[in-house]
Image (cartoon, grey):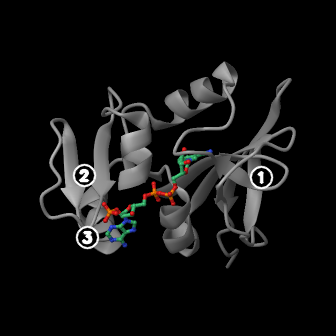
């Protein structure tokens, strides 16, 4: 299963200065619950923003930098190579950002985990416009600061 997890605000802002623009613990909990035990794939900027591999998950970083190494992180130099290797491991594969990664993978995704953050934050990174017309909402939860939805791709009824 290829999944994408993101939180964006009412202007589709996802980040500012390589950090999340908000601090919403309940949203971090949703992220942790979904990704724990699975595989997370991220761009190098997102990794630098987090600053360390996230525990309990296989951390994959994509970079063009052949000299990039970090303990506890698997490094790949293309999205395709990272995805091919991740899918061999038999776990759910999450693309966790940032903007450049989301733009490249949105069409490959089977399942979206989206937190719609209330408000409009100052930002410099955005989540692209995507079509969810082939997806159905399988979970929806309402929190004070955001609405959380999971979408799964429709399978054709034969
Ligand atoms: N709200 C959310 O849910 C959420 C989630 C994640 C991130 N974010 C935010 O998103 C922002 C970062 O987004 P971003 O677009 O600047 O950075 P990014 O996507 O995290 O990382 C970009 C870097 O990834 C590498 N990369 C991307 N595509 C590649 C490819 N096809 N082949 C090889 N390397 C590739 C390159 O690294 P090199 O330059 O090393 O080659 C590129 O500079 C931050 O503000 C972060 O906080 C928000």
Q: Is mark 3 within 8 Å of ligand 1?
A: no
- Mark 3 element type: helix
Mark 2 lies on residue: 89
Snapshot quadrant of residue 121: top right
Label 2 packing within 10 angstroms: few (<14), some (14-19), many (20+): few
Q: Can residue 140 be spotted in the picture?
A: no
Q: What is the spatial separation of the Cα atoms under label 1 and label 3, in whole angstroms?
A: 30 Å
Snapshot quadrant of residue 23: top right
Vertical arrangement, residue 28 with respect to residue 93, above or below:
above
Q: What is the spatial separation of the Cα atoms under label 2 and label 3, in whole angstroms?
A: 13 Å
Q: Which mark is residue 137?
A: 1
Q: Residue at x 14, y 64 (%)?
A: 66
Q: Residue at x 56, y 34 (%)?
A: 31
Nearer-N-terminus badge (2/1) = 2
Q: Which mark is residue 81?
A: 3
Nearer-N-terminus badge (2/3) = 3
Could you say which is closer to the camera, residue 50 or residue 41? 50
Q: Residue at x 82, y 55 (%)?
A: 11
Could you say which is closer to the camera, residue 158 or residue 36? 36
- Mark 1 element type: strand
Which quarter of the figure is the N terminus placed in? bottom left
Q: Is mark 2 within 8 Å of ligand 1?
A: no
Vertical arrangement, residue 139 with respect to residue 110, above or below:
above
How far across and how far down the image is residue 123, in percent?
70, 49
Nearer-N-terminus badge (1/3) = 3
């Amino acid at each position: 299963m290829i999944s994408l997890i993101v939180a964006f605000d009412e202007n589709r802002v996802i980040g500012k200065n390589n950090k999340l623009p908000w601090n919403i613990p309940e949203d971090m909990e949703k992220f942790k619950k979904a990704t724990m035990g699975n595989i997370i794939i991220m761009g190098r900027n997102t990794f630098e923003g987090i600053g360390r591999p996230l525990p309990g998950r296989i951390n994959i970083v994509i970079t063009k930098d052949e000299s990039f190494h970090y303990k506890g992180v698997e490094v790949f130099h293309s999205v395709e190579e990272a995805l091919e290797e991740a899918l061999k491991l038999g776990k759910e594969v999450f693309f966790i950002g940032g903007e450049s990664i989301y733009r490249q993978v949105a069409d490959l995704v089977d399942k979206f985990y989206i937190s719609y953050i209330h408000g409009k934050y100052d930002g410099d990174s955005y989540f692209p416009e995507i079509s969810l017309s082939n997806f159905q909402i399988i979970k929806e939860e309402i929190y004070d600061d955001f609405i959380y939805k999971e979408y799964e791709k429709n399978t054709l009824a034969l």
